[in-house]
Image (cartoon, grey):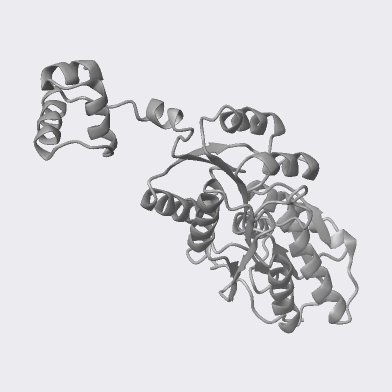
Amino acid sequence: MPTIQEVAKKAGVSVATVSRVLNDNGPVSSNTRKKVQGVIDELNYQPNLLGRNLRRSETRMILVLLQNISNPFYSKIVKGMEDTAHENGYNVLICNTNTDIDLESIYLDFLKNKLVDGVIFTCTAMVTEEFNKLAKYYPVVLCNEYNKDIKAPIVTIDNEIAGYEATSHLIKLGHKKIGMISVNNVGSSYDRMKGYMRAIEEAGLEVNEDYIVYHTFSYKGGMRGIKQLFELDEPPTAVFCISDLIAVGAIKELKSKGLRVPNDVAIVGFDNNSIAPMYDPSITTIAQPRYDIGKKTMEIMLQRIKGNENNNHIVKLEHDLIIRESTLPSVD
């Protein structure tokens, strides 16, 4: 592999001149620039961009930590991040954490060792105090989550209102026994639960804690949730699932029990993943503007890298309730 010294020697110029041509700065005549560029092309010289960026105290790389990289929900969010990063001369490094604090710590060493310029979290296992300490010294943004005590930029939707609207839809259809399949240790799930409980209370119904079950953010989590709910003497006639993956698992388990969706049990999901309109039955869900969430998150990250210190910047984007086949009026 040719070196910058070899390029300089063959072009008959100094290493500094080659560097100025590569970086497109400093006084270099058009003839010299053309000659140096010709040698670069002839030798197929590839500059060490990482080394150059490190000398500038930048890597042009943003680390994105995903809770579950196999979840299709993140595809459009990441696309929005990547498009925005590339438009501004940055690249994206994606890592999966499974909300594991040890994995997070390993990846955060990339930031602390200046191998990336900033970190976007889609979820974190860190306690709030540790997260805020990190945000004080490094560019970090929290995406699609909300924690009122976090002192860092946040991009999300209003999950409480979304949970309220999803549950209210089921109540308007005549359901009085409404279950919820949620997960633990995720801020957005708590807010969706607040909305679920508020809708039930405002309708004059009683919140049955047995109807709220906690499992994983997965297809199997939905199956296990339905199994648990239908061990009750009076199982629910409708279930609010806090993700479409959970909803798919829930419907699968209901079918295995000989129950029909929505005739016997209505299901509402969350996220509007690509599977939601294609599944049988198609899934009523809360649609998040995933591409815009990713785009806005990256825009804020780039501002943070440039020195914008607005750590308490919170952006809440709009969501929609999309009604499909998995909800119909209660037959009882």
Q: Position of residue 87 (x, y in %)?
A: 37, 53
Q: Quadrant of residue 111?
A: top right
Compared to residue 29, the image places residue 307 above or below, namely below
Front-lying residue, 176 or 262: 176
Q: Quadrant of residue 252?
A: bottom right
Q: Is residue 65 visible?
A: yes
Residue drawn at x 62%, y 32% is 108
Residue drawn at x 56%, y 30% is 110
Q: Residue furthest front?
A: 27
Q: Position of residue 115 (x, y in %)?
A: 51, 30
Compared to residue 189, the image places residue 236 above or below, namely below
Front-lying residue, 48 or 209: 48
Front-lying residue, 258 or 275: 275
Q: Position of residue 197 (x, y in %)?
A: 83, 69
The number of numbered discs placed on residues in the rendered structure image is 0
Front-lying residue, 177 or 79: 79
Q: Is residue 236 visible?
A: no
Q: Quadrant of the C terminus?
A: bottom right
Compared to residue 83, the image places residue 131 above or below, namely above
- 205 vs 216, left or right, is right
Q: Position of residue 32 (x, y in %)?
A: 12, 32
- 84 vs 106, left or right, is left
Q: Quadrant of the N terminus?
A: top left
Q: Quadrant of residue 134?
A: top right
Residue drawn at x 60%, y 44% is 139
